[in-house]
Amino acid sequence: MNTQDSVDKRPEHIQALLDEETGPRFMGLPERWIDHPTWRCANGHVSTWNVRRDCGDAVCPACMRPVWLTAPEDEEREV
Ligand SMILES: [Zn+2]
């Protein structure tokens, strides 16, 4: 079993938002997500900035869990 996959796997609802995007993409991500960066962590916090740890991982400023880029209109809520 490869545990790295479960750590890096994008949460389902972000993947669903990604699947709905039809616009131009850069590096597999919608350009409008990159133009207005919004970050969501596994605990449901959403913010427009993140903390960059010494090891290079981006983490949530509220709970220090890993974050993923999400849609600009994504809102903070439990998922
Ligand atoms: Zn968080």
Image: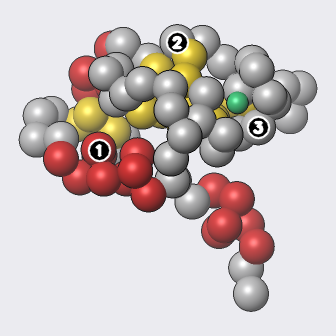
Name which residue lies at 70% across and 59% down. 7
Q: Which numbered circle lies on residue 17? A: 1
Q: Amino acid at mark 2?
A: Thr
Q: Find the residue positioned furthest to the right.
A: 54
Q: Label 3: state its secondary structure.
A: loop
Query: Which quadrant of the frame does ligand 1 lie within?
Result: top right
Q: CA distance from mark 1 to mark 2?
A: 17 Å
Name which residue lies at 76% across and 37% down. 65
In percent of width and height, residue 22 lies at 10, 41
Q: Amino acid at mark 3?
A: Arg
Sequence-wise first label, 1 or 2:
1
Sequence-wise first label, 3 or 1:
1
Q: Which numbered circle lies on residue 48? A: 2
Left of 2 or right of it: where is 35? Answer: left
Name which residue lies at 25% across and 21% down. 32
In percent of width and height, residue 3 lies at 76, 73
Left of 1 or right of it: where is 71? Answer: left
- Does ligand 1 reach within 8 Å of label 2's beta carbon? no
Name which residue lies at 27% across and 34% down. 30
Q: Amino acid at mark 1?
A: Leu
